[in-house]
Image: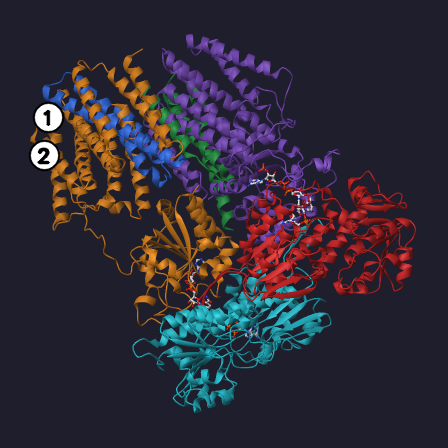
Chain colours: A red, B cyan, C blue, D green, E orange, F purple
Amino acid sequence: MQISVPAETTPNERRVALIPDITKKLVRAGFEVVVQSGSGQQAGFSDETYTEAGASISTDRASLLAQGDIVLRVRKPDADEVGQLKQGAIHVSYLDPYNERELVDTLAKHGVSAISMEMIPRTTRAQKMDALSSQANLAGYVMVLLAAEKLDRILPMMMTPAGTLSPARVFVIGAGVAGLQAIATAKRLGARVEAFDTRPVVAEQVQSLGAKFVEIDLGETGQTKDGYARELTPEQLEMQREGMKAVIGQSDIVITTAQVFGRPAPRIVTGDMVAAMKTGSVVVDMAVDSGGNVEGSSPDEIVDVDGVSIIGVSNLPAKVATDASQMYSSNLFNLVTEYWDEESKTLNLDPEDDIIAGCLITHDGEVVNETIKNL
Amino acid sequence: MQISVPAETTPNERRVALIPDITKKLVRAGFEVVVQSGSGQQAGFSDETYTEAGASISTDRASLLAQGDIVLRVRKPDADEVGQLKQGAIHVSYLDPYNERELVDTLAKHGVSAISMEMIPRTTRAQKMDALSSQANLAGYVMVLLAAEKLDRILPMMMTPAGTLSPARVFVIGAGVAGLQAIATAKRLGARVEAFDTRPVVAEQVQSLGAKFVEIDLGETGQTKDGYARELTPEQLEMQREGMKAVIGQSDIVITTAQVFGRPAPRIVTGDMVAAMKTGSVVVDMAVDSGGNVEGSSPDEIVDVDGVSIIGVSNLPAKVATDASQMYSSNLFNLVTEYWDEESKTLNLDPEDDIIAGCLITHDGEVVNETIKNL
Amino acid sequence: MEVVFLTFILVLSIFLGFELISKVPATLHTPLMSGANAISGITLAGAFLSSGAGMATTGTILGTAAVAFATINVVGGYLVTDRMLSMFKSRKEG
Amino acid sequence: MEVVFLTFILVLSIFLGFELISKVPATLHTPLMSGANAISGITLAGAFLSSGAGMATTGTILGTAAVAFATINVVGGYLVTDRMLSMFKSRKEG
Amino acid sequence: MDISLLANLAYIVSAALFIFGLKMLGSPATARRGNMLSALGMLIAVAAALTDQGIVDFQWIIVGVVVGAIIGATASRLVAMTAMPEMVALFNGSGGAASLLVGWATLYGSAEVQTFTAVTVLLAILIGGVTFSGSLIAYGKLSETLNSAALVFPGQRIFNSLLLLALLGCGIMACLDPSPDSPWLYGVLGLSLLLGIMAVIPIGGADMPVVISLLNSYSGLAACAAGFAINNNILIVAGSLVGASGIILTNIMCKAMNRSLTNVLFSGFGAIKQGKAIEGEVKPISVEDAYYILEAASNVCFVPGYGMAVAQAQHVVKELGEILEGNGAEVSYAIHPVAGRMPGHMNVLLAEADVPYEQLVEMDDINPRIENVDVAIVIGANDVVNPSAREDEDSPIYGMPIINVDQARTVFVLKRSMASGFSGVDNPLFFGENTRMLFGDAKESISGVVSEFG
Amino acid sequence: MDISLLANLAYIVSAALFIFGLKMLGSPATARRGNMLSALGMLIAVAAALTDQGIVDFQWIIVGVVVGAIIGATASRLVAMTAMPEMVALFNGSGGAASLLVGWATLYGSAEVQTFTAVTVLLAILIGGVTFSGSLIAYGKLSETLNSAALVFPGQRIFNSLLLLALLGCGIMACLDPSPDSPWLYGVLGLSLLLGIMAVIPIGGADMPVVISLLNSYSGLAACAAGFAINNNILIVAGSLVGASGIILTNIMCKAMNRSLTNVLFSGFGAIKQGKAIEGEVKPISVEDAYYILEAASNVCFVPGYGMAVAQAQHVVKELGEILEGNGAEVSYAIHPVAGRMPGHMNVLLAEADVPYEQLVEMDDINPRIENVDVAIVIGANDVVNPSAREDEDSPIYGMPIINVDQARTVFVLKRSMASGFSGVDNPLFFGENTRMLFGDAKESISGVVSEFG
Ligand SMILES: NC(=O)c1ccc[n+]([C@@H]2O[C@H](COP(=O)([O-])OP(=O)(O)OC[C@H]3O[C@@H](n4cnc5c(N)ncnc54)[C@H](OP(=O)(O)O)[C@@H]3O)[C@@H](O)[C@H]2O)c1
Ligand SMILES: NC(=O)c1ccc[n+]([C@@H]2O[C@H](COP(=O)([O-])OP(=O)(O)OC[C@H]3O[C@@H](n4cnc5c(N)ncnc54)[C@H](OP(=O)(O)O)[C@@H]3O)[C@@H](O)[C@H]2O)c1
Ligand SMILES: NC(=O)c1ccc[n+]([C@@H]2O[C@H](COP(=O)([O-])OP(=O)(O)OC[C@H]3O[C@@H](n4cnc5c(N)ncnc54)[C@H](O)[C@@H]3O)[C@@H](O)[C@H]2O)c1
Ligand SMILES: NC(=O)c1ccc[n+]([C@@H]2O[C@H](COP(=O)([O-])OP(=O)(O)OC[C@H]3O[C@@H](n4cnc5c(N)ncnc54)[C@H](O)[C@@H]3O)[C@@H](O)[C@H]2O)c1
């Protein structure tokens, strides 16, 4: 069983799908691992470390793709590379299947079994394979660091002989995995943290990190059975905007993480809210890639709006590429070994299994995933 | 009594000597405050805020300098601007008098009473005017943020479904004011922190922040009566380097703050130590301006040495210009009001007073400071 | 022999008295004092005999006065303690 | 009347016994048990009378056996407790 | 069965009820039920006492009970809630009077009085008399009928000594001739009442609660003495229970007021040193005594310094703060700008322990209201609370603003020794009248106090 | 003065010494001195007893004392440190025997025995006999001379009931005819010894220390009964002190072993349920009982979950951890990867509370050694310790690795209710044989336990 790891081609993607430590485990489990030369370079892993771990290094990307029974990567494959894959190969990566219908069809056409890491269900049992969580977690940390670094003030309170510096105020919108980690990191740095989310259940979670939950009455909201937020009605969005305006106005840092899975991100922070902020304040928009929670944010740029900096980084986890690769890699390992059948030496992609049912998009030449099929 | 605040001319100097809040206090105390237009812009204070605080805004730098009874600024004056100052004016700023003998003489020649903020003695009573401390404190915080932002890993430990990320190791060399704040900040972020200093008394201070003090036996060391470190002998430096090599090798972040007042900074981290560090590690050199503690560091650059980044920022407090200005400004305010004589409406620069004796460099046309005079 | 028994009883009671009271919150100092005070009105049990044993007149007068005093102590003591404690209770709950 | 006094003494002693022992660290459970056990050898004080009052032979024999048993309890109990406690002490210090 | 045996069994039951009652009175949850139990015990004891076969005539008993019950019930209903302590003093005084009278009456009952009985009678008269007159004075001082200030006059100590001598003399004489008409007996009576007065007048109004508690203990002892005089078990048991528990309670109350029991016990016979600072005396305090004071405090201010950091005591400090808040006290943390060894040192630590930012106060905010602070707890701070910075012009730190903890009602200083701080200057705070030194590592000291609570 | 009065005064002194001694035995710092004080009290009491004028012949006394002293001293010197508990059992047995014999001998002394005396004599024989034979069995089980397993046979309950009936019958008959030669007396004697045996055999070796402590309490009661039989104060005082404090101590020991006293007291007469899980029973535990168990534990593992975060209990948890360490226990914190609501949730909190990184262990490290954990304290975790993830194939969380706290010796689960966790799955852990539920907010529960220490 050969596992192939092609180098990432997306610009700024510094992560790698497999790190040497995990490679070693796979080799020990009986897999043959081939890694394209230079894959791990930007995440801090040299080719030698892979060789030491038991992988072979290949410079021939095409043959590497063609021979892999399992192909592991971070980002979705180029449409023209799909054709190079083996018939029946299993391809595991992010896939964005909601928006990449064409790519999905191509994968099906070539008989590739494509697993989409975004589609791992968010159940307790699946958590160890849940790359969205593991990466969002790191993103939450990175956002706070970026904001703190940009801010012209310090986050903690300080009572010093030269006067008292009051703690900076941080407002986190959307307290999912990333939002919670952002809250925790900002709290750690000593900031006064407030947070808001449309799902009322997270109020307790926010408080469990020592932050304050901002109550805004939106009427009926809720979450889907998978734990994702439901989209808000336009009226609700308006109510939310009003309620948050005051809080945003007095915050030094605003961090938005509000995403609704598979759809464009809600526009939460509008231009007038940004205008109401103090000079020197910082806004970080995690949803910049899926449309942006913040008006005026732009991917991989720091936009200055009247002295307020809006930071939009499209690939936050890549900022801590070493750790992000380690976690992504563990997720893949857990996925592969969970379904690895020692006897038959195959991956047992049982459509009855709820995790496989969730994340397996194409199989045996067909789009098998219920949600994607009916899109 | 007019206080003049000229805009800073040094590149990258984003701080301002007086912030609106303190301006208000001075105006209330009876001073007339004139601020050059745009002075506070980069620290986040617009001209209007100064006007609201009761200052007048001037665009004529020359007349502002010529009319000030007291001139407050952050950086030392240009030699050619000294001539524009009023005879008998009091000029308060950083002055670097050890290395700027010529400038000091010029100031004396023009009958300016120059107060050097670096020379405020480090006594308990003088702490409120001690700008070195207040700025070093902020520098300590900034260094950790810069390093954390640059590092490809996260600082805290995390036990997650996708494996355990061990905490990053941070090694702080020199546990003075800046070093201690760096320790505190890194601890806050969850790193495993170790520290070293030549003065054994700080071991307890390091532990009081929850970090580990690295013991290296250097024989006789000590501190001067002002609390500064004494310079090490070459042999001692060698012993220190050996002892630290091991610790540096396993650290993800190394922060150096070792300075010996008035002299070039000791070279503590040599090229081979840097070479022994893991790829992706980060070194921050606070002493980069006075020669550098780290071999290969260069002001305002991130030098990459075989995958290790060496960060040298010459003006760290300016990274948090708002807070830094607030603190510097408080220091100046405390200094001015401490010696302000309400009756005679003059600053009472009594040479008997130990603070004045320490920081007043020139007066009545002469260099009056004992240390500088005998240099 | 009775003295021996009485002394035994005395010693044991004193020890017990010491052991009984340990950490008492400040709010209970006054009620506890007052409650203990009411118990010391036990003299009443002795005063009955002085008042009712048909002794010389002076003795009976003294005894009756003793009964009156002791009753004040007992009745007043318990009632006042209860009043204090009831207030304390409602303050806590309210 | 004696019974009354004895009962008083009994009741007071029982209360006192309950109050005396409160939180005892686990390491002291055995020594405390053993120390209390030694005290229960107080029967010795009563056994003397049985043994030495010049009663019928059987009585004296029983009495003497009682003295012997009680002495074992007293002597052995105190010594063994002390041994345990001394070890405990030195372990703590060492 | 013998009726007196039955009565005595009833006494045993009532003794048990008293014991339970007292125990339960010590905890807020059970106090009220405890008081009822003890009242029930009293009912049983009184009923049993009425079966005594010595009683031939109930009429005077009824008179006495009715009069007493009316007075007691009325007084206890009418008294204002704020006047409770003086009411307790009055009730206490009548208890003392009752014991005195019972003892005295005993002399009329028996034809020939044994020496042992005579001694116990005299003790009942002595203790009862002191309790009675002492309680009246205490009442007077508390209700401000009398001047509540401590009354001191020259020669007081000599006068009191003579009084004691005279009492002893009269007592011995009365024992030798234990007749109800003996002038010595009246001597003892009069002198006892005088002694009660003399013992209480030199004590200030603020100390009165402690005095009442002590007199309460005395009234128990008086009942106990009366019990010996008339050979009554329940009097002995109940009396000595009250006597002993009263002493303990007095001790606890002393600690909560930060005074020592001997100080109160003998203040009538020594010189009064109130208000005079004893210069140069360091007063250490135990963790337990610190607990008693904190438990009664309603405004507590922590003043942390470098020592808190060294001891890494921030977490326990926070916990103590929360406990005190739970106990109804107002809690704040006063941060001096230069406390610690780097700017913001205390902030880092307190933030780590999650102390809410709202509870942190700056020096300039706390100083104007420091007089309202019941206890300022200085945790390993030294220079930043050194009053010589304010007062001693020659001090190297003269002119530095400090947190004026010396002006708080009580100051606890937690440090390991008398060593000086960073600037090496001696600290007169440690010798202050209202300062108590809690020596030891700050974390251990605070942990100790924390575990005293609960 | 009367010599018997003197003896009795000596008894009072020795009673006081016993009281002090017992009190001091309860605290490590004073235990040894306490034992000496109590020995001194014994010396005084014994010396005073020798002055009794009833004693006409000292020769047999001397014989008895010498024999007893030699045996006692030798045994106590020679016994190995590890065999202490069985030695205590033997000594205890001889105390019981002594009381039995004293009671019995009394019948030979007085010509005509009153009913009251007869009852007390029979009580002395009964309790003494049970103590004696029970202690011997306990000795046998502890020293492994007898099979240390619990011995159970069919019809045990009926047999024991009959035994009790027979004892009652014999006792009544013996009271009616209280002569030393009455066959009923021998009946009582024999049956008492049998009862002692029957009471101890069904108890397993591990519970023996509790049994010995209980028998110790009995031997005190036996002495007390003997005291009534021969009218001796000091026997009554010392005996009932030992009896009462022994019960309390037994109770404390039970709690430390997480068993209830009634369970031990009546285990001989009921069915033995050891080792059999009672399915579906939730066993709540009080803070106090939790303290007793933790105090005796030497390996404690905290398993925090989301509830710790909600309660913000991390600081007190850390403090409890430190206290337990100070108490000699090994302490670790087992972190499940998905505990909490975000990755690393527990790390953030424990780092805030400054728990050293060395004490954090991963799931895979703790599971192999979880059997050695005396107490696993589950703080607001639920799903991550749910054994159905391991055992129940139908569970939605089947297959998720969990921390196997159910395999620790004892598990405390701290939560507010029986509610399920994030995944909404019921948790069989809560019904486990070795699980105790400490209901309430986690922070308050832990604070409660913390304040029990110290
Ligand atoms: N904040 C800054 O930026 C900065 C920087 C440098 C210097 N300073 C100077 O540091 C001083 C700060 O004042 P401060 O009041 O905070 O500290 P301090 O005056 O240095 O006093 C600290 C006290 O803590 C006690 N202590 C140490 N370890 C302890 C422990 N484990 N448990 C209990 N007590 C302990 C010490 O007494 P024992 O030894 O008797 O226990 C000592 O007296 C000022 O003089 C200031 O000028 C401040
Ligand atoms: N780690 C992650 O990234 C992440 C993210 C999302 C979801 N999850 C899921 O969250 C769960 C984590 O498991 P867990 O064991 O940590 O938590 P859990 O299963 O959710 O259980 C938490 C328990 O804490 C108790 N609790 C709540 N507040 C309390 C308080 N103040 N005091 C005492 N107890 C309190 C609750 O019981 P009472 O109400 O009876 O008190 C509840 O049963 C897993 O199912 C995991 O899949 C994890
Ligand atoms: N079962 C598991 O073990 C498991 C694993 C991972 C995540 N989860 C849960 O799934 C949930 C979603 O996680 P996520 O971070 O990936 O979600 P996400 O990235 O889809 O959304 C981020 C957050 O933004 C919020 N949001 C959406 N619209 C908003 C709006 N208009 N205003 C404010 N907030 C808005 C959402 O409620 C969510 O909390 C979380 O509650 C998480 O705990 C569960
Ligand atoms: N009296 C006061 O209240 C007061 C006020 C401010 C500062 N201080 C004290 O003054 C001292 C110096 O403060 P600073 O931060 O400005 O000092 P600094 O900037 O001069 O030096 C920084 C640190 O580097 C250390 N160092 C020097 N050479 C070194 C070497 N070769 N290797 C390792 N470390 C080396 C020094 O010991 C010092 O701790 C501190 O202890 C501080 O507490 C006192």
Q: How many marks?
A: 2
Residue at image location 30% in from the left, 20% down from the top: E44
Pointer 1 residue Cβ closer than 8 Å to ligand 1:
no
Q: Residue furthest front?
A: A235
B137 vs F8, left or right, is: right
The residue closer to the viewer here, E127 or B91, is: B91
Label number found at residue E180: 1
Q: In this picture, is A252 found above or below E180? A: below
Residue type highlighted by circle 2: Gly
Q: CA distance from mark 2 to mark 1?
A: 12 Å
* Earlier-in-chain disc, 2 versus 1: 1
Of the 4 image quadrants, the one containing the C terminus of chain E is top left
Residue carrying label 2: E187
How far across and how far down the image is residue F220, in percent?
Answer: 44, 26
Q: Residues within 10 Å of mark 1 (few under 14, many from 20)?
A: some
How far across and how far down the image is residue D30, in percent?
Answer: 51, 36
